[in-house]
Amino acid sequence: MHFLRYYFRTKSLKEIAIQLSHGKHSSQGSESHKIDIQSQEKTLLFVGTKGVGKSSLVFRFLEKNDTPKPTLALEYIYARKSGKTVAKDICHIWELGSGSSRLEVASLFSSFSLSTQSGLTLVLMLDLSRLNTLWTEAETFLVKFREIFSSNESVRDKRAGFEHLRIADEHRDKGQIKPFPVPLILIGGKYDIFENQEPNKKRLAVQCLRFLCLVNGASLLFHSSLDPSLIKRSRDVLNHYSFNSSLNQAAQFDYNKPVYVPFGTDSVASIEGTSQYVTQGK
C-alpha cells in the first residue's frame, strides 16, 4: 500500500477540501499527484477522544511503523492499492485533531464534495479507559457529525448506495433505528486497560455501546495498539470499508472479550439479554 501525507497549515480547511474534491493533491498541480479518474475512491474520516490513538491506528492501517506526532488540527493521507483495473484504488484518510473548533469542522465538511468518490465512512474512536466520559464523548461527536452530514448535499445524493441504510430498513428493530447519514464505525480504543475493569462495569459499558451502535446503524469493535490480533482485525475492517476487501470476521458479543459487532448482527433483545425469552415467546 502506497501513501502520502500532507500537513495543512497555510490554506483554509475549506479551500483544501474543495481542492481535494476536484482531485488535486498538490498546490503545484504536478501529474504525479493527480487522482486517476478511473480508480475507485473511498474516504475515511477519523474523529474521537483526544489521545485515544487515532494517529497510531491510521499508521497501523497503512503498515507504517513510525511513531506519529500529535494531530494539531487536520491531517490528510491518501493510500493507493491495486484494484481490479490498471489504475490503483484510492482511499482518502482524514484525521481531525481533538483541538479543532466546531466552526472549522463545519466549514470543512459542509463544503466537502463526494461527487468524485464512492463514499465516506466516519470512524469514531472512543477511550475505553475513561468510562465516566464514554457516553458523553460519543453523544457529542455523533450529534455534531449527524448535523454536518445531514446538511451535506453530496452525502444526501449518495444515500441510495449506503449498505447500512438497506440493512436498517430490513432489520427487525428498524422502528428504533435512526441510521447515521454515512457508514459509521465506532472503535473502542485502549482495550488493554478496559479488559482489567470490573466485570459489571464492562458489561454495562458494552451494553451501552452496542445499543448506541444499533440505533445509529454503526459497527462496533474494540482495539488495542498493544495487541497484534486486534491491530490486524482493525486493519481488516478498515480495508473492507476503504478498498472493499473481503471480511471474514465472526461477531463477538462477550463483554469479557474484545467486542466486534458488525451492524446488522445485533438486536435490542440480544443487548438486553432477552433474546432467548423472545424466541420462546414466538
Image (spheres, rainbow, N blue to C red):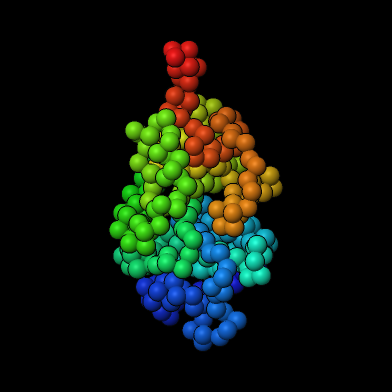
> Does residue 154 show up?
yes
Q: Residue furthest top?
A: 280
> x, y percentage for residue 193?
58, 41
The vertical placement of 258 against 238, above or below, is above
Picture residue at 62% right of the left edge, 57% below the top: 61
**Is residue 56 visible to us here?**
no
Q: Is the C terminus in the top left, top right, bottom left or bottom right quadrant?
A: top left
Q: Position of residue 5 (x, y in %)?
A: 57, 72
Instruction: Provide residue 194's location: percent of width, then percent of height.
Output: 55, 38
Position of 263 compared to 180: left or right?
right
Seen at 48% across and 17% down, the residue is 279
Count up the numbered dots: 0
| Quadrant housing the N terminus | bottom right
Is residue 163 or residue 150 the one in the foreground? 163
Q: Residue at x 39, y 47 (%)?
A: 180
Indicate the position of residue 231 as horizontal and vertical percent values. Answer: 64, 49
Residue shown at 34%/33% (left/top)?
175
* Foreground residue among 91 and 16: 91
Horizontal side, residue 147 vs residue 162: left or right: left
